[in-house]
Amino acid sequence: MNTDTSKRTRKASTVVVALVLAAALGLGTLSLFAGSGSDSDSDPGSGGGRTADAGSGDGARGDAPSAQDQALLGLQRRAAADPAAMGEKDAPVVLIEYSDFQCPFCGKFARDTKPELVDKYVAEGVLRIEWRHFPIFGDESQSAAQAGWAAGEQGRFWEFHDVAYGEERKKNSGEFADDELIAMARTAGVRDLARFERDMGSRAAEEAVARDAAEGQNLGVTSTPAFLINTTPVLGAQPTEVFEEAVEKARAAAGEAE
């Protein structure tokens, strides 16, 4: 099978998997991000966007949160062995990030904002960050997402993440072709590159990426980056202060609930 045919087959298979998983999730469509005026990178725009009011519970894990808040909080996986998560699994605040490795504003968040949040909140046990693959820019985005998953299978997801976002890369220009992804994995310290290559092209990788994408689609995510901080959506590569405010608000609400 030649490379073009293989890519078409993989893309078609991924679409089918995404549709099946979207139905299987059974969450319904919350449309949390839909129509909220984000200027983030599906357009692409300035990476602006805004913080939106998601519901009455505002991140609390108690005091009878609304049905929508319960559904949003239920998206938190809190799996101790999740290779695409960092922070304590029982942290009071969880930031879920829907991102594409080809998205320049996702890269801006990764380089400029995430390290500050890690130092200030993750290290203190206040914040947990959970990554979701949300490839929206075509075949190279899909391949990069599956490569990220494959790196995670060897415990090197965040190292791969940092390499992929370490510099700005032109979308769909071959910078996320398979050989480039293997080189990124090598730089990220992935030990078994043969296994990485197999995992990257596997059905399991397709299903994992499709599951994440279906979750975002059910929330109404149409652009990247998009974030859910407990029950509060944040759209675009906002200034660090916007994330800090949302984390503090969710932290206070969680403390009141306890």
Image (cartoon, rainbow, N blue to C red):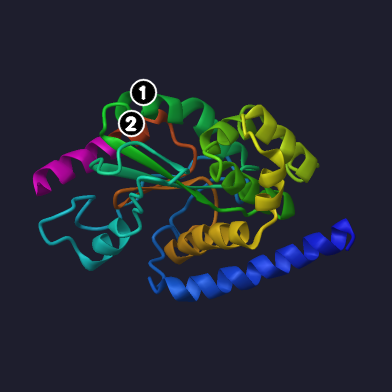
Callout 1 secondary element: helix
Residue denoted by label 2: 122
**Magenta region, main secondary structure:** helix
Above or below, comparing residue 50 to residue 116 in the picture: below
| Relative horizontal placement of residue 79, taking residue 254 as reference (left or right) | right
> What's the residue at 81%, 62% (across, down)?
6
Picture disc at residue 12:
none
- Please state the horizontal and vertical placement of residue 94, each as a whole percent of the image: 32, 44
Q: Position of residue 106 (x, y in %)?
A: 55, 39
Q: Position of residue 47 (x, y in %)?
A: 54, 40
Magenta stretch encompasses residue 1: no
Q: Amino acid at mark 1?
A: Asp
Residue 170 visible in the shown view: no
Numbered disc 2: secondary structure: helix
> Where does label 1 land, which residue?
119
Q: CA distance from mark 2 to mark 1?
A: 6 Å
At 76% across and 37% down in the image, what residue appears?
180
| Residue range highlighted in magenta | 246-258
Seen from the viewer's position, the closer of residues 194 and 201 is 194
Quarter placement of the N terminus: bottom right
Residue 26 visible in the picture: yes
Q: Residues within 10 Å of mark 2 (few under 14, many from 20)?
A: many
Within 10 Å of the Cα at label 1, are there few (<14), some (14-19), or many (20+) other Cα atoms? few
Vertical placement of 111 versus 171: above or below? above
Q: Amino acid at mark 2?
A: Val
